[in-house]
């Protein structure tokens, strides 16, 4: 089963990646995708002017690959695509694209949900929001951690 997992140093087009991903899938009945966007508003309601996603070369890519491999083993899927940005992002820019192909829709939905829960809480990224009052590190929320527990 193919895995296409990449850390993106520059902006990417989810539409272009999905167009390629959905081609030539005679055995698949489902492709589920998720696009995460940089928010222009922090949890406190303040305007976010930019988002900084720091990473550690090698370690971050490995963490993403391990998560994708776990999804591949856990669910009946044919293919997985993960693109995750790092560096500086403006509000509304895509941060992450997850796409999963499977013969059956339920497995594709579950795998995409699983991937996002793990990427959000376990992938080796450090997120910093820049606002008018300064910059602050952002940790996964209690809800993010609760979502992850579902898969234990």
Image (cartoon, grey):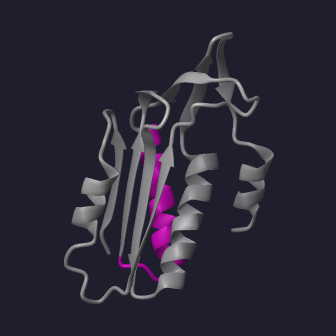
Left of 118 or right of it: where is 68?
left
Q: Picture coordinates of residue 1 (x, y %)?
A: 32, 75
Which of the pair 40/100 is nearer the observer? 40
Left of 16 or right of it: where is 58?
right
Q: Residue at x 57, y 74 (%)?
A: 110
Q: Picture coordinates of residue 85 (x, y %)?
A: 41, 39
Q: Picture coordinates of residue 49 (x, y %)?
A: 54, 20
| Quarter where residue 129 is shown | top right
Query: In the displayed structure, would residue 62 be above or below residue 66?
Result: above
Q: Quarter of the image containing the C terminus?
A: bottom right
Which of the pair 73/12 is nearer the observer? 12
Segment colored magenta? 59-78
Query: In the displayed structure, would residue 24 be above or below residue 66?
Result: below
| Quarter where residue 98 is shown | bottom left
Q: Residue at x 45, y 28 (%)?
A: 90
Q: Which residue is drawn at 64% across and 47% down?
A: 121
Q: Residue at x 48, y 76 (%)?
A: 108
* Magenta stretch, main secondary structure class: helix
Residue 73 in magenta stretch = yes
In the image, farthest residue toward the top: 133
Q: What count of labels does the image hold?
A: 0
Left of 100 or right of it: where is 151?
right
Q: Picture coordinates of residue 68 (x, y %)?
A: 46, 61
Which of the pair 45/76 is nearer the observer? 45
Residue 62 in magenta stretch = yes
């Amino acid at each position: 089963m193919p895995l296409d997992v990449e850390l993106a140093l520059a902006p990417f087009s989810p539409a272009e990646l999905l167009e390629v991903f959905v081609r030539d899938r005679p055995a698949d009945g489902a492709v589920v995708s998720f696009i995460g966007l940089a928010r222009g508003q922090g949890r406190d309601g303040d305007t976010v002017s930019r988002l900084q996603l720091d990473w550690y070369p090698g370690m971050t890519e490995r963490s993403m690959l391990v998560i994708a491999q776990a999804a591949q083993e856990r669910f009946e899927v044919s293919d997985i695509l993960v693109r995750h940005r790092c560096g500086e992002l403006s509000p509304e820019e895509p941060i992450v694209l997850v796409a999963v192909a499977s013969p059956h829709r339920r497995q594709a939905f579950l795998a995409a949900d699983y991937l996002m829960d793990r990427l959000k809480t376990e992938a080796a990224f450090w997120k910093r929001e820049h606002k008018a009052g300064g910059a602050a590190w952002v940790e996964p929320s209690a809800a993010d951690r609760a979502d992850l527990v579902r898969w234990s």
